[in-house]
Image: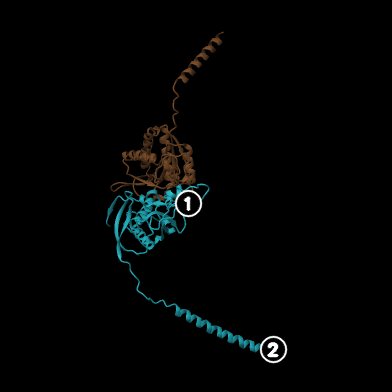
């Protein structure tokens, strides 16, 4: 036989548990409503479309191994990093087209990011030596001077790139030349693939070194 | 005693011969003309995938073997980086070339892109050869000679009726070589409405003959200081 006081205590605890359960449910519903109220995803301002401007693309041609300068109109953002990415994306879109003179699959989405930073004068860095046991001092890079562009490519782009010295070098040089043609302060370019250093693009062109944009000399200009 | 006279005569002859040799001006040692053939890729590294399920590593090895025979027949010493389907890294290739003290180093490649033969010298900025060069840029001191070798190869290949494209490139193995080094990339030969595939034995023979002729011509230039 269960004592009467135990039945009373059990009943009180059961009622209290039910009341607390209902209270918690109500609080959860209120919190959920507040969260939804704060996530108003309706547009508040119209998106800005950058005006179309003339961009110079250095386009490769596999048939004679040449680099041609072509003018294309495309909307370019004002921010330099985004601008650099936009021109490279356009170049890779040209290469992904059916009638490309340098066919490379992937398209513009293969350029993940482009980072611009002050370039270090490699000659100064190389010649800096320890004097009197002191650490070498390298002059800080000029903020208005030459720039180094770090181009981060998708791994799938490198994996699907045609293999060969000429085709890989043409891709690398046309990317370097296009950057310099639209952002003249860019004089050096380094390449990453999926955010990491990769030995070669597709088995040949060395991606561990810094490329100079001066190496990407065009042979002649042309309009598409 | 007869044997004493004979021995005396032999001794006098030997002394006279020794005197003659020592009297002559010491001849400059004739440097051995060695060519290094580096068949690119190999083993797990198949290189480019070509038509007819061919791989670049097989084409480069076939070209290397063919060239070695042609050069040996012309009295040229040849060192190859590989004779079978094995993987060799770029540093090992450069080590083999540098130990051989070669007068010409050819890195052999194949591709489906482009047309004819693509010749590449290192894109490193030319410098004066130094005794202790940085490994990754050791070729810098040899770029001028490499460009000269590229010119000789260009003449011979063009003379053989092949399309030739010249360029500069960055290949880890070539950039570490301390010899006149050129990367030779063989592509299908596109003519007017025709195309000669890489697997065509006659085409391979034509390319090998032209390169061998260029290396014979280069021997005379390589002997010059």
The answer to which of B91 and A132 lies nearer the viewer is: A132
Question: Label 2: which residue?
Answer: A6
* Quarter that holds the C terminus of chain A: bottom left
Whether label 2 touches label 1, CB < 8 Å: no
Is residue B216 left or right of A1 when viewed as pictured?
Answer: left
The chain to which mark 1 is attached is A
Q: Residue furthest right?
A: A1
Residue A42 position by quadrant: bottom left
Residue B65: x %, y % from top left = 43, 39
The answer to which of A115 and A88 lies nearer the viewer is: A115
Q: Which hue belongs to chain B?
A: brown
Is residue A9 left or right of B77 when viewed as pictured?
Answer: right
Q: Residue furthest left?
A: A223
Question: Label 1: which residue?
Answer: A137
Name above or below for residue B171 compared with residue B221.
Answer: below
Residue B13: x %, y % from top left = 49, 15
Q: Secondary structure at mark 2?
A: helix
Residue A159 position by quadrant: bottom left
* Quarter that holds the N terminus of chain A: bottom right
Which class describes the residues within 10 Å of circle 2: few (<14), some (14-19), or many (20+)? few
Name above or below for residue A211 compared with residue A28.
Answer: above
Instruction: Point out which mark residue B224 bears.
Output: none
Is residue B87 left or right of A217 when viewed as pictured?
Answer: right
Give the CA separation, mark 2 to mark 1: 84 Å
Is residue B146 left or right of A220 when viewed as pictured?
Answer: right
Q: Secondary structure at mark 1?
A: loop
């Amino acid at each position: 036989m269960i004592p009467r006081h135990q039945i009373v205590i059990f009943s009180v605890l059961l009622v209290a548990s039910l009341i607390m359960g209902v209270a918690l449910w109500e609080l959860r519903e209120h919190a959920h409503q507040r969260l939804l109220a704060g996530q108003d995803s309706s547009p508040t301002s119209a998106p800005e479309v950058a005006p179309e401007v003339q961009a110079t693309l250095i386009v490769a041609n596999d048939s004679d191994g040449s680099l041609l300068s072509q003018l294309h109109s495309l909307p370019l953002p004002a921010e330099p990093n985004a601008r650099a990415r936009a021109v490279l994306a356009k170049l890779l879109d040209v290469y992904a087209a059916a009638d490309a003179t340098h066919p490379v699959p992937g398209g513009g989405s293969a350029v993940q990011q482009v980072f611009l930073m002050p370039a270090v004068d490699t000659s100064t860095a190389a010649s800096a030596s320890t004097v009197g046991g002191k650490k070498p001092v390298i002059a800080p890079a000029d903020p208005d001077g030459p720039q180094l562009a770090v181009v981060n490519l998708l791994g799938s782009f490198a994996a699907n790139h045609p293999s060969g010295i000429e085709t890989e070098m043409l891709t690398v040089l046309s990317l370097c030349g296009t950057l310099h043609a639209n952002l003249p302060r860019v004089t050096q370019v380094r390449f990453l693939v999926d955010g990491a250093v990769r030995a070669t693009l597709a088995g040949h062109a060395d991606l561990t070194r810094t490329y100079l944009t001066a190496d990407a000399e065009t042979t002649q200009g042309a309009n598409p | 005693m007869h044997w004493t006279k004979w021995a005396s005569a032999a001794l006098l002859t030997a002394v006279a011969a020794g005197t003659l040799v020592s009297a002559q001006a010491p001849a400059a040692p004739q440097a051995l003309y060695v060519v290094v053939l580096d068949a690119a890729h190999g083993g797990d590294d198949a290189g480019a995938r070509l038509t007819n399920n061919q791989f670049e590593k097989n084409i480069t090895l076939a070209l290397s073997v063919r060239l070695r025979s042609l050069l040996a027949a012309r009295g040229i010493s040849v060192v190859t980086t590989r004779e079978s389907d094995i993987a060799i890294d770029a540093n090992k290739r450069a080590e083999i070339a540098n130990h051989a003290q070669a007068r010409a180093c050819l890195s052999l490649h194949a591709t489906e892109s482009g047309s004819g033969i693509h010749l590449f010298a290192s894109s490193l900025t030319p410098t004066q050869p130094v005794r202790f060069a940085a490994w990754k840029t050791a070729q810098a001191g040899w770029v001028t000679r490499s460009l000269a070798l590229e010119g000789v190869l260009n003449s011979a290949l063009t003379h053989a009726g092949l399309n030739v494209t010249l360029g500069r490139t960055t290949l880890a193995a070539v950039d570490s070589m301390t010899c006149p080094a050129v990367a030779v990339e063989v592509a299908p030969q596109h003519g007017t409405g025709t195309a000669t595939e890489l697997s065509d034995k006659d085409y391979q023979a034509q390319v090998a003959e032209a390169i061998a002729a260029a290396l014979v011509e280069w021997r005379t230039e390589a002997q010059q200081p």
